[in-house]
Amino acid sequence: MNAHSLPIRKRVPDGDGSVQVHMDPTLKIGNAKVFAVYGKGGIGKSTTSSNLSVAFSKLGKRVLQIGCDPKHDSTFTLTKRLVPTVIDALEGVGFHSEELRVEDFVCEGYNGVMCVEAGGPPAGTGCGGYVVGQTVKLLKEHHLLEDTDVVIFDVLGDVVCGGFAAPLQHADRALIVTANDFDSIFAMNRIVAAIKSKSKNYNVRLGGVIANRSAKTDEIDRFNAATGLQRVAHFQDLDVVRRSRLKKSTLFEMDDSPELQMVLAEYMQLAEKLWQGIDEVDASPMKDRDLFEFLGFD
């Protein structure tokens, strides 16, 4: 078969040829700056998202944080409790969304940050992408996005399937939280590939890497240099972060200390940088086997 006789590949809608949930192309958030935070499970995405939300609010921005993990614990340091999820609220009214009130699924957290937990279907059933879509739909129906400046999606760790890639439909920039270790960087590489794939159909672009729980960033920086990524913030593994989680508080509510001032300054600098706008990153993820060889430790 010569080149002229090769079949022409047609562009197919997002989700075709896979187990991905189909996204509603008409469901748009609006004028807010939208960020989706990804990373390996347990890497500190919720801590990062919540404190970043507060940092934006300290800049005078109206902020909405949407937790996309069925554990629904993204916003507990902001609200001091596990708030009802969108799925809980919908079940309570027999999935008749027109019967819901704003207070049924939106809670105000520290410094005015508005908090929503999407929740998820029972284990082994349904798709998280549907839940994210219903959450955005509800927010739009109740006009909660019209006066919002910043939306932060805190996304379930380690999952880059169509369902939990759903926030990428709405985000302007995707941020990846990682540590300076093999497993975190390996997960980051897979997430980079997922975001790059979604960027073919949506406006989302990679914004950069947030180094977390790491004294050093040498392996992260080496990986970034090889793939075209950039580091936009570095949060060390400080005890004040651990204590803030135990106190169910954001870092901005903790007792003052030199190490606290250091981390708060980094959050404020990151919020300012993101608000001003960061250029997209054109990164090229590695093949799994190439990355395995690349990440060589002593």
Image (cartoon, helix red, strand yellow):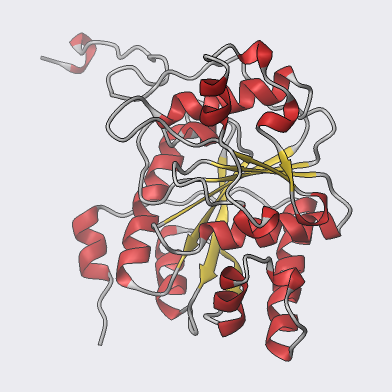
Q: Is residue 182 left or right of residue 254?
A: left
* Image vertical order of residue 121 relative to residue 251, above or below: above
Residue depicted at x 56% and y 83%: 238
Q: Nearer the viewer, residue 114 or 164?
A: 114
The C terminus lies in which quarter of the figure?
bottom left
Give the residue at the far front of this rendering.
92
Residue 71: image x %, image y %? 45, 47
The N terminus lies in which quarter of the figure?
top left
Q: Is residue 105 left or right of residue 183?
A: right
Report which quarter residue 241 is drawn in.
bottom right
Residue 83: image x %, image y %? 61, 44
Q: In the rendered image, is residue 28 in sight?
A: no
Q: Is residue 1 left or right of residue 120?
A: left
Residue depicted at x 22% and y 60%: 290
* Image vertical order of residue 122 relative to residue 297, above or below: above
Q: Is residue 291 left or right of residue 237?
A: left
Residue depicted at x 61% and y 55%: 76
Give the residue at the far left of this rendering.
1
Residue 273: image x %, image y %? 74, 59
Residue depicted at x 60% and y 48%: 280
Q: In the rendered image, is residue 121 in sight?
A: yes
Question: How many numbered marks have been drawn onto this rendered protein structure?
Answer: 0
* Image vertical order of residue 145 relative to residue 186, above or below: above
Residue 270: image x %, image y %? 71, 63
